[in-house]
Amino acid sequence: MGEKVFVAGATGAVGTALIPLLVEAGHAVYGGTRRADRAAALEARGVTPVVVDVFDAQALRDALVRIAPTVVIHQLTDLPQDLNPALMAEAVVRNARVRIEGTRHLVAAALAAGAQQMIAQSIAWAYAPGPTPHTEGDPLDLGAEGGRRISIDGVLALERSVRGAVGLTGTVLRYGQLYGPGTSNAAPKGASPVHVEAAAWAALLAMRHARGGIFNIAEDSVEVSSEKAQRELGWHAALRRSQEVVS
């Protein structure tokens, strides 16, 4: 028997890759989106659509209490298509708001609904300068300035909200730079890339195996180590949609 799973950001890049993995594993999937015009596409994929804005705390709480999910997966971002440089300054602020205020609302709603587990998307390029490859215990770049500092503050708030929620097993997945279908990059890009389907697999494996904590999710590189995820979750960067899903 599968779990009830609520995916916030179900129509985003990772959410889109994650949905079929959850459905094929036998879970009852509820997909959150703020756009009503995307509900039919979610339904066609075997998902119960939930049209709700993460910034509407009461509506979000009501929705999750009604669903009563066991697991809440946070894949929300607010970034422009193709990471358009002309739009990124404003997007950084919006995305930080999602991580700070949106995560706070989502955690509160999950607790009100009696959820047991939350898995949230973070980033693997927020570490302070220092010896590499970075592991999960390394400090974040709190000395950053400008747009990077805005992003770091958002990441810090998200991770504290998820990890500090009493009554929830909170798991944070620090994804590298996403590439593949639905992302802004067709090929690996950045110092710590990860294919979007491998990123989705990390969320499914965290559901099964994680006892909480923080995990880097990126291809092997000189910048970031994902050894912890490989060891504790059974994750590896070559995982793709075509591989068998076993409950």
Image (tube, rainbow, N blue to C red):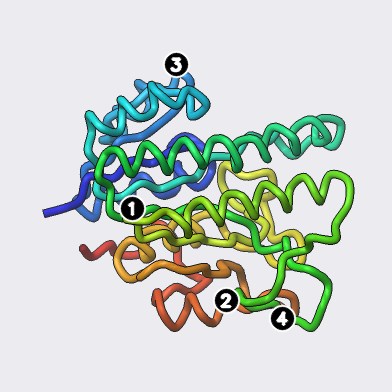
Identity, as a three-letter code, of the amino acid under mark 2: Ser
Tally of numbered discs = 4
Cα gap from disc 1 to disc 3, whole angstroms: 23 Å
> What residue is drawn where x is 35% and y is 29%?
61
Above or below, comparing residue 61 to residue 193 in the picture: above
Residue tagged 3: 37
Residue tagged 4: 133
Nearest the eye: 227 or 172? 172
Residue tagged 2: 226
| Quarter holding residue 204 | bottom left
Which of disc 3 and disc 2 is earlier in sequence? Answer: 3
Q: Secondary structure at mark 2?
A: loop
Cα gap from disc 4 to disc 1, whole angstroms: 30 Å
Above or below, comparing residue 15 to residue 57 in the picture: below
205 sits to left or right of 132: left
> What residue is drawn where x is 50% and y is 70%?
238
Cα gap from disc 4 to disc 2, whole angstroms: 9 Å
Q: Are marks 2 and 3 in contact (CB under 8 Å)?
A: no
Identity, as a three-letter code, of the amino acid under mark 4: Pro
Residue 205's x, y, as percent? 36, 65
Which of disc 3 and disc 4 is earlier in sequence? Answer: 3
Q: Secondary structure at mark 1?
A: helix
Which of disc 3 and disc 1 is earlier in sequence? Answer: 1
Identity, as a three-letter code, of the amino acid under mark 1: Leu
Q: Are marks 4 and 2 in contact (CB under 8 Å)?
A: no
Quarter of the image with the N terminus in it: bottom left
Which of disc 2 and disc 1 is earlier in sequence? Answer: 1
Q: Nearer the viewer, mark 4 or mark 1?
A: 4
Residue 105's x, y, as percent? 47, 35
Above or below, comparing residue 124 to residue 220 in the picture: above
Residue tagged 1: 21
